[in-house]
């Protein structure tokens, strides 16, 4: 039987990194087995609809590279793929379940349930339904229905014994039936809960492996009993291990720390997120941890998913991101950097190939910008880092404390002297030989001939050109800035140090 798996998120408007891991593993199980990957939107439990949530979910998954064979956006034979569009289907199966004795109508009012729970709390008992309506006679039920009493549908749990379920990763799991609540399957408004809709859909959609996070293990016996009551064959169950932070606690709730959209906006690459998430609970047999999505599609296997908690290590994500950034060709790097440079108002795109430097009005081409981003290629960990790293190139007048022009114990007079000397020799270089090699040679000779210490010349030069104590190579910077701008910046440094 060919594999059919589904990713079944509730649309909240954002994709949690844990859900990305779930989606990814599920997708990889499908792809590595030539199976089908289905997207199902589980929106029955939502208080209110988040507008555009489904679209943005599909969009972010597409950005990551996860695609579906069936789903609300691509259709398929088992649709609709949005649960709120399947209410009639659930109604039919509610009737069937009542007939089969796997569930019952509960007419208890919210007030009674509240009172019951308070009483249980006082008596230090677990708060759960006391099964008052479990054994109503047909006549009693008929009477209540006739008088218009509202009801929920509850699952009829066994009163004792063990429920034994089998997880593909953990093996057998035993649950004491007496701890199971007769929980609600369908609410008073006729809308099913997760527990009901999920099982009905998995069955009707021919799901072969229910793949989900291990926070759902407590639902496992309830699901198994539902399959039993319906007389349906159970799919296999795979619970992915929990993801903890480095301290062993729950992942932070702060959006920026866990939302995939925010990782993308900060300049994390899809390749890095995929590689990172793939290792959250799964390990490749050959220990080679650098894996692209297409490589993962070939080598992923359920058997190598672990049961023990996975650790979310942000440094590791940065490591992967840096690695994938370094592997980008320069044109791709610039393409990724452009939105950040534009958003930071450093440049404006005039057309596909020319850009205006906002502060100076100078118009530059792609090659010029590629030269700039290439300087930081090895260093940046996130694409967004590029803005801070290179913004000095786009300044009209750099702002910095003139004191940082002084290298070690240098005096103002010495700095002035060295910069003035530099200005003179740089001015003599013809623009057509203004390149890194020439600059390096000429400035090197100048330093040597005067017996200067390298730092006493290069340090003030660096600060003049960048306004910073640390920057990419100073010859490269001077080369990219060009003769005119380089001289202008040295003159300004001389003005500032007066
Ligand atoms: N709707 C559930 C969630 O968002 C799906 C769990 C499952 O895959 O069964 O976590």
Image: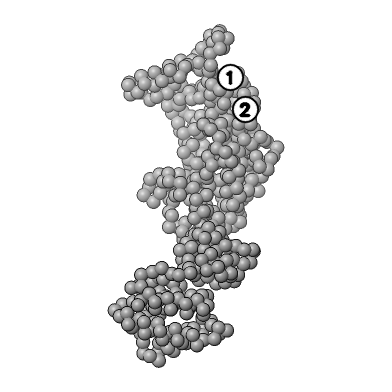
Return the x and y of residue 434 as percentages of the image width and height.
Answer: 53, 82
Q: Residues within 10 Å of mark 2 (few under 14, many from 20)?
A: some
Element type where label 1 sits in the image = helix
Number of numbered callouts drawn: 2
Q: In this view, does 8 lie above or below 454?
A: above
Q: Looking at the figure, which quarter contains the N terminus?
A: top right
The residue singled out by tag 2 in the image is 87
Which residue is at 45% across, 76% downward?
489
Q: How crowded is mark 1: few (under 14 residues within 10 Å), some or many (20 or more)?
A: some
* Front one among 472 and 417: 417
The mark that comes first in sequence, 1 or 2, is 2
Return the x and y of residue 474 as percentages of the image width and height.
Answer: 45, 77
Q: Ligand 1: does it lie within 8 Å of the C-beta at label 2?
A: no
Return the x and y of residue 173 as percentages of the image width and height.
Answer: 47, 36
Element type where label 2 sits in the image = helix
Which residue is at 64% across, 26% downward?
88
Residue 98, disc: 1
Q: Looking at the figure, which quarter contains the C terminus?
A: bottom left
Which residue is the extreme one toward the left? 409
Proximity of marks 1 and 2: CB atoms separated by less than 8 Å? no
* Front one among 190 and 195: 190
Which residue is at 57% across, 44% downward?
57
Return the x and y of residue 117 as percentages of the image width and height.
Answer: 39, 21
Which residue is at 52% across, 68% downward?
360
């Amino acid at each position: 039987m060919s594999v059919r798996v589904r990713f079944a998120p509730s649309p909240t408007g954002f994709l949690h990194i844990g859900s990305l891991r779930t989606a990814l593993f599920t997708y990889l199980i499908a792809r590595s087995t030539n199976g089908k990957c289905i997207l199902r939107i589980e929106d029955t439990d939502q208080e209110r609809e988040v507008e555009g949530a489904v679209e943005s979910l599909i969009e972010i998954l597409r950005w990551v590279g996860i695609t579906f064979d069936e789903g609300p956006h691509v259709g398929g034979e088992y649709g609709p793929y949005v649960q709120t569009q399947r209410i009639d289907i659930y109604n039919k199966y509610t009737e069937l379940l009542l007939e089969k004795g796997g569930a019952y109508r509960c007419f208890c009012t919210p007030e009674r349930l509240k009172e019951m729970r308070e009483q249980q709390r006082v008596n230090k008992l677990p708060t759960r339904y006391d099964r008052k309506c479990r054994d109503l006679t047909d006549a009693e039920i008929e009477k209540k229905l006739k008088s218009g009493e509202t009801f929920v549908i509850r699952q009829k749990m066994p009163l004792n014994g063990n429920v034994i379920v089998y997880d593909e990763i953990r093996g057998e799991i035993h649950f004491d039936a007496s701890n199971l609540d007769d929980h609600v399957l369908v609410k008073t408004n006729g809308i099913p809960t997760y527990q009901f809709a999920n099982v009905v859909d998995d069955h009707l959609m021919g799901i072969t492996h229910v793949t989900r996070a291990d926070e759902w293990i407590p639902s496992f016996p309830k699901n198994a009993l539902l399959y039993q009551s319906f007389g349906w064959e159970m799919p296999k169950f795979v619970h992915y291990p929990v993801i903890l932070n480095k301290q062993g606690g729950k992942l932070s709730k702060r959006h920026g720390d866990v939302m995939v959209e925010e990782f993308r906006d900060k300049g994390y690459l899809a390749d890095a997120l995929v590689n990172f998430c793939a290792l959250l609970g799964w390990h490749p047999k050959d220990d080679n941890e650098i894996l692209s999505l297409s490589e993962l599609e070939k080598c992923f296997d359920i058997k190598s998913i672990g049961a023990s908690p996975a650790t979310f290590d942000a440094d590791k994500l940065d490591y992967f991101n840096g690695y994938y950034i370094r592997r980008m060709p320069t044109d791709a790097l610039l393409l990724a950097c452009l939105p950040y440079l534009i958003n930071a108002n450093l440049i404006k795109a005039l057309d596909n190939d020319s850009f205006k430097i906002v502060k100076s009005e100078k118009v530059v081409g792609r090659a010029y910008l590629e030269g700039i981003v290439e300087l930081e290629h090895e260093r940046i960990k996130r694409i967004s880092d590029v803005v801070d790293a290179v913004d000095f190139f786009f300044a009209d007048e750099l702002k910095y404390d003139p004191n940082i022009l002084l290298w070690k114990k240098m005096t103002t007079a010495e700095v002035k002297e060295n910069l003035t000397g530099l200005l003179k020799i740089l001015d003599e270089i013809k623009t057509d030989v203004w390149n890194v090699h020439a600059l390096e040679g000429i400035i090197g000779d100048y330093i040597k001939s005067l017996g200067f210490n390298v730092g006493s010349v290069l340090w003030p030069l660096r600060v003049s050109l960048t306004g910073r104590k640390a920057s990419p190579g100073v010859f490269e910077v001077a080369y990219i800035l060009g003769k005119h701008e380089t001289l202008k910046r040295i003159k300004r440094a001389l003005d500032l140090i007066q």
